[in-house]
Image (cartoon, rainbow, N blue to C red):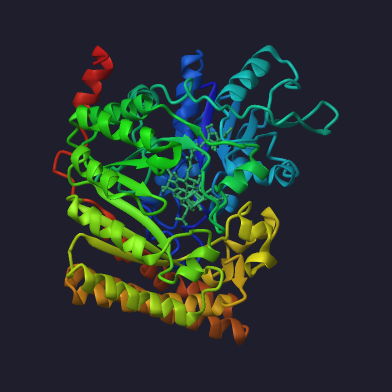
Amino acid sequence: MSYADLVLLHAPSVYDFRQKAILCGPVSDQIPSSSVFEMYPIGFASIADYLERAGYRVRIANLAVRMLNNRRFDAGAFIKRLRAPLFGVDLHWLVHAHGAVEVARLVKQHHPQSKVIFGGLSSSYFYRELMQYPEVDYVMRGDSTEEPLRQLMVCLKERMEPASVPNLVWRDSRGTVRENPFSHVPADLGGVMVSHYTNVVRSVLRYRDLVSYTPFGNWKEYPITAAFTCRGCTESCVICGGSAAAYRQFYNRDRVAFRSPEAVVKDVRQIGRFSRGPIFILGDLRQAGDDYAYQVLNLLRSSRMKNQFVLELFNPAPTELIRQMGLSCPRFCLEISPESHDPKVRRAAGRHYSSEDLEQTLGDALDAGCGRLDVFFMIGLPRQTPQSVMDNVDYCEYLLQKFEGDKRLSLFLAPLSPFLDPASLGFEEPERHGYHVLFRTLEEHRQALLSPSWKYSLNYETDWLTRHQIVEITYEAMLRLVRLKARYGNIPQKLAEAGEKRLQAAWEMTHRLDELLADGSLEEQLPHLKPKLDEINAYPASDRVELQLPVGWLKIRPWRALWSLLTGR
Ligand code: B12
Ligand code: SF4
């Protein structure tokens, strides 16, 4: 197998998920990944692009997708065949706490001479604890690790101690853990993500390995991609580990760093060369001010791209901006997350706007010709009671009536799961926000992921909802919502039936697991339940199916991609 200077590995959430008997629950229904959380951070592509431009060879291997798509795929044997002095493992999302450390263990087992580096937001949060695992040599902190990594590559090549590499946590020759200053937090992102999508296409061809670069299980059927507008966030939602408050306190970022409108639209053009799938412009465009938002929209308009765009709003927007979205991105899909129908709950969760303003924006989006309008509500918020969750479903019906069952209106409700994010205000100031945090350490979260039911991996309760109530009300409310959508014709009857079947079977299984736990026979019975658990986990999540935008038959354009690589056009 060919040599690389750095191999970036993405682990599944639970390393041996194929052997384990776990009821996953609706933890990932609203993202393209499955409960294996097989999507790797886009930062991998950015790191690879930056280091390749500096003359290094970087290879990405999405082990999670490979394990998911091929039940016989042997991750250990695959890792054994790789050759590199440095292996990077992302622990960006805490849901990978189990898999990431196990993958590091495999790397050390097969390549004891190679170094292992961790990075991502969760690594940056748990860096001290991570350094206690013998399989972790380095942790690189922060949301912008491209340049510090380049400096580390130089040190490794020159056999120098990395004492001057910013953001790096490492062990010196006496085994003492050293924390270098966390000083590389750039405000200017001009030097990164210059050609990361083109670089991915080039690497797929170089290593003849599309699977390892595939972002999630069925990406070839549904090739959604994303263009990033920034690093950080201007908002401070209580449940979010990527909020302004979290970035300030844990990731040393005082201010959001924005990419220029030109850079964002350049990404979009790069994507258009190989994909006709939807493109998600991540982050509310108004974060950098209204001018920025209009500039991006104007550039998108002049790009004349045929791909469908997904845009997001953090709070209601003026009618004129939404009209502009419709003009620049015909059939655009708009996403907004009021979290709760109840303004008191919404405010307690950190979103300060009225339902009237929300409804005005929803109406404006439909009038502006949006192709779909996704509205997300959440379970597990401060001040939210079981009754409030059920009232939220009633509010969904009210919206369907108000907008006359408009088929473009898609309403979603899901639990905050499996974890309340570390670094979020809820996690850091639990009493203030009514949270009870059940696990604090990385190792506790690692073990929690192995629980037989998602109920026991939840790392929180609230003053208003126990874990048991979160699970019960989730199934009750989600079932009612599926039926409601079917009644209003917002989802096809068949999809509703499949969704209902999945929710009902999973709900019953949570009760069965509780009974077995209570009578002390869970451990003995679990292996017998595995086939049933696998079957339930494999039922299609109707929310995920509903979230997929229609794509034409020619979704990926491999020859066009190859041509543009060869010709630079
Ligand atoms: C965009 C986004 C997504 C996109 C991801 C697109 C992608 N492929 O990256 C989508 C919508 C799919 C998503 C999904 C999820 N997300 Co999200 N997401 C975000 C968001 C809004 C922005 C992240 C971002 O802009 N990154 C910028 C890119 C360029 O950087 P990056 O990928 O992070 O990589 C850099 C560094 O992190 C680091 N790095 C990363 N990996 C590695 C590895 C090594 C070895 C090194 C050295 C460095 C390194 O270096 C990179 C380059 O500098 C943040 C919130 C925020 N404001 O930050 C939440 C956030 C990261 N997501 C979060 C969560 C919880 C999730 C989900 C688990 C939610 C769920 N239950 O479904 C899923 C997981 C999906 C999966 N893996 O399958 C939490 C994470 C909290 C935590 N600590 O665990 C955050 C903080 C907030 C939130 N609640 O949404 N998410
Ligand atoms: S959840 Fe709130 S704080 Fe977190 S990234 Fe989204 S808007 Fe920002």
Q: Quadrant of the C terminus?
A: top left
Up-down: is 230 above or below 163?
A: below
Which residue corresponds to the image point at 62% horizontal and 24% vertical from the top-left?
148
Which residue in the rendered view is the most extreme toward the left? 553
Up-down: is 13 above or below 43?
A: below
On the question of residue 379 being in view, the answer is no
Seen in the image, is 71 located left or right of residue 466?
Answer: left
Seen in the image, is 225 located left or right of residue 560?
Answer: right
On the question of residue 568 being in view, the answer is yes
Please state the horizontal and vertical placement of residue 335, each as a whole percent of the image. Answer: 33, 53
Seen in the image, is 371 located left or right of residue 505?
Answer: left
Please state the horizontal and vertical placement of residue 33, each as a whole percent of the image. Answer: 39, 52
Which residue corresponds to the image point at 44% horizontal and 58% vertical from the top-left?
35
- Looking at this view, is 29 or 334 the one in front? 334
- Looking at this view, is 38 or 272 the one in front? 272
- Looking at this view, is 332 or 513 the one in front? 332
- Looking at this view, is 92 or 342 the one in front? 342
Seen in the image, is 212 located left or right of residue 307?
Answer: right
Please state the horizontal and vertical placement of residue 348, each as a whole percent of the image. Answer: 55, 65
